[in-house]
Image (tube, helix red, strand yellow):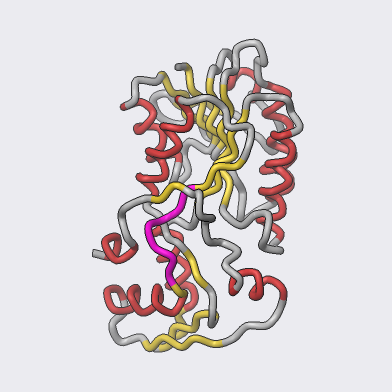
Amino acid sequence: MDVVVTGGSGQLGRVLVPSLQAAGHQVRQMSRRGAGPGGVRADLATGRDLAAAVRGAEVVVHAASDPRGNPWEVDVAGTRRLVQALDRDRLQHLVYVSIVGVDRVPWNYYRAKYAAEQVLLASGLPVSLVRITQFHHFIDEMMATARRGPVLIVPMGWSAAPVDVAEAAGFLTEVAAGPAASDVVEFGGPEDLAAADIARAWAAVREPNVRVVATPLPGKLSAAFREGGVLPGPRAARGRRTYAEHLG
C-alpha cells in the first residue's frame, strides 16, 4: 500500500515508518521539515504543501500532534485540513493515533484529541481511532520532571498502563493493513500500575537515592486519573514488554 505517516519525525513516527516498510508498504514520512529519504514536507497548522504530500495515498496513519504547543490548531484544525486534502476515491483507510482517556480526562490536550476524533468520525472517511496508553519514554520524562532534589512526588491513587513504543507501532501497522473499524480501538501496556509503584521502579534504576512520596491531589483532573481514566478497557489489545523490562 501507498502509506503516508503524518508526524513521521516524532518519537512514534520514527519507529512506525520502518515497521510499515518491513510489512511491505511504500511509506512517505510527512513532517514540517520533510528531512531524510522518503520524507515529504507539509504543515498541518497552515495547510502548506499538504495536498501534495498526501496525493495518491491509499492509507494515512495520522500521528502528528502538538501537545506542548496549540493542539487545537494542529490536532483539530490540522485534522480538518488533512481530511480536505485527501483523495477520497483512492483512500482506503485513515488510522488516527489518539490516547486512552481522551473521552474521560478533563485536560485541554485530551479534549483537543477527542475533538479531532469527532472530526474524523464525521468526515465520512474509512477511519480507525486507535487510542494508546503512555509510552515508556514518556513515563521516564514525567518521573524526571517530577523529581525535586532527593524527593520524587507522585499523585496518590493515579494509575497508568505504560506501553512499549515499538509494540504500539507494530499494532498500528496491523490495524493499517486491515479494514477500517469506524470506531475506537485501544492498545495498552501489559500491566496497570499505580503511579507510586512506577515511580519506585524508575527511581530504583535511574535515581536510587531518591525517595518517592505519594500525595493526594484535588480537582476534577486528579479524580479522573484516580478513577482509571487513562487505563485501557477490558477489550483493549495489550503489549507484552513491561515497564520494568524497559528500565532494564
Residue 13 relative to residue 63: left or right: left
Q: Identify which residue is drawn at 39% across, 29% down.
A: 20
Q: In the rendered structure, which segment of residues is drawn in magenta?
A: 187-193
Image-based side of 20 in relation to 181, left or right: left
Residue 9, x across and y down, in percent: 46, 39
Residue at the image point whose x is 50% and y is 80% from the top: 154
Front-lying residue, 187 or 67: 187
Image quadrant holding the N terminus, namely top left
Q: Quadrant of the C terminus?
A: bottom left
138 magenta-colored: no
Q: Position of residue 209 (x, y in %)?
A: 30, 87
User: x and y percent of residue 190 in the render?
Assistant: 37, 57
Residue reaching furthest to the left: 248
Image: 33 above or below 243: above
Q: Is residue 154 left or right of residue 47?
A: left
Q: Residue at x 68, y 41 (%)?
A: 117
Q: Is residue 32 visible?
A: no
Residue 98 locus on image (x, y percent): 58, 46
Picture quarter containing residue 143?
Answer: bottom left
Query: Looking at the picture, does residue 71 appear above or below residue 183?
Result: below
